[in-house]
Amino acid sequence: MTEKTDVVILGGGVIGLTTAYHLALEGLQVTVLDKSDLGREASWAGAGILAPGNLSKAHRPLDLLRAFSRNRIESFSLQLKESSGIWNGFRKCGILDLEAPSAATQNAWVDEEIAFQSAEPSQYPQVQFLSNSGIFFPDGALLENPLHLQALIRACEIQGVRLRPNSHSIQMIKAENRIESLATVDGKRFAADRFVIATGAWTELLPELTPMKLGIFPIRGQIVQLAIEGEMPVSCIVESGKQYIVPRNSDEILIGSTEEPEAGFEKANTPSGIQGLLDFAHNLIPILRSAQQVRAWAGLRPGSKDGLPTIGPIPGFDNVFIGAGHGRSGIQQSLATAQILTDLVLGKRTFMDISPFKADRPRSQATEPLFRS
Ligand SMILES: Cc1cc2nc3c(=O)[nH]c(=O)nc-3n(C[C@H](O)[C@H](O)[C@H](O)COP(=O)(O)OP(=O)(O)OC[C@H]3O[C@@H](n4cnc5c(N)ncnc54)[C@H](O)[C@@H]3O)c2cc1C
């Protein structure tokens, strides 16, 4: 059985679904395939931290992705709410970073005209019981991943996107330098004029992409959720190195996250991972010792060898594009990535030069992001 639409998107995470929604708004008929439930992998597991950004001043490739997305996410959240009826929990709560930045990083914040201020503990009422000084970014924001995914899925449905969960694609059916269809494990075929690959950490498992050595691999991240009774001790995001505390809603706190490339595709919590996160939070905000651990989960970030996502046409094919490898910042970069992929599918000029993200770039140097999440 073959189903045909204008575009088939492989992967129903935040990158695939956001792209599907944008393409559907452009009038294209779109199908999204996912090997399991839609939006239940890295995009669901993340903490939803959105670093600040200033599109008119950003100039490095990663900064442009971050700034474009950050500038649009508030209005996009409202658009999703209007369409789906689901509010994704977006709010500008600020980020307090407890780690001293290098002079180069601080200069880059100044160049991008990002608002920030050094703060002593008494100056930030957003966090009680904390004795460290830090740097506060008032424009730091967050959203609640499960709600954002639900809103995207619903909005896609309303726009007529054909959503096909439990459709594990195992083969690309080729005709010369084009893909004609994707074959799934249960014998179905999904044909289209153009294809978008948004398979996150699993991208290099696709047999046709494995030889390309895209440098995309899984990096496990664990998160612990605490229930807070009474007053919330934290109302902004608190970051220290790669770990953070996130107030998810009025009575829950997330503590994240581990970074475990050695775990491969093993998506499970470990006692040492959970204990490390609890120790971090308890040392920082001792009152959290009395909070109850509600649950813990793990997700597989699509890591990238050089710290950059791969976005653009896939070499050797005329009708296939990819958006994968966003590492720790895929929610944050999703709107820019979806816009680029939409423009590529439509044959339009992209809003930025995408050559730094091309699939066949040399991947020798690692790019450090200006913000860790
Ligand atoms: C613990 C943790 C914390 C994070 N915190 C943040 C944060 O605060 N801010 C931020 O911006 N980012 C954060 N991230 C990163 C962010 O979640 C990811 O970068 C982003 O979700 C990647 O989106 P994606 O759509 O590429 O991947 P995914 O959400 O993993 O989606 C890929 C989809 O492709 C499907 N798929 C794969 N192979 C196939 C196949 N062959 N056939 C069919 N379907 C297939 C998978 O089932 C999956 O649903 C975090 C991630 C983790 C794990």
Image (tube, helix red, strand yellow):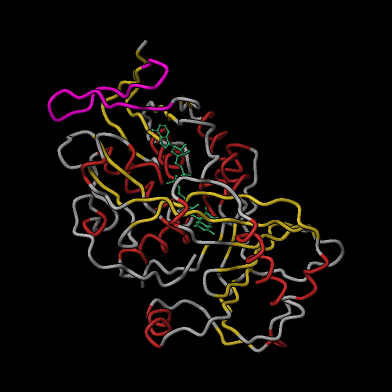
Where does the N terminus fall, quadrant-wise? top left
Q: Give the quadrant of residue 207.
A: top left
Nearer to us in this view, 343 or 247: 247
Q: Is residue 103 magenta?
A: no
Q: Picture coordinates of residue 123 (x, y %)? A: 69, 86
- Number of callouts: 0
Query: Is residue 87 left or right of 50 when viewed as pictured?
Result: right
Query: Is residue 161 left or right of 171 when viewed as pictured?
Result: right
Nearer to us in this view, 126 or 98: 98
Q: Picture coordinates of residue 315 (x, y %)? A: 17, 42
Q: Which residue in the rendered view is the most extreme toward the left?
A: 176
Nearer to us in this view, 373 or 27: 373
169 shown above or below 286:
above
Nearer to us in this view, 236 or 76: 236
Query: Is residue 95 left or right of 111 when viewed as pictured?
Result: right
| Residue in the picture at 48% in, 61% down | 70
Q: Give the quadrant of residue 233.
A: bottom right
Q: Which residue in the rendered view is the most extreme toward the top?
A: 1
Q: Is residue 182 magenta?
A: yes
195 shown above or below 96:
above
Q: Picture coordinates of residue 117 (x, y %)? A: 56, 85
Residue span colored magenta: 168-188
Q: Picture coordinates of residue 37 (x, y %)? A: 54, 32
| Residue in the picture at 34% in, 27% down | 170
Query: Which secondary structure type mostly characterizes the magenta part of the structure?
Result: strand
Q: Which residue in the rendered view is the most extreme toward the right?
A: 230
Query: Is residue 5 left or right of 47 when viewed as pictured?
Result: left
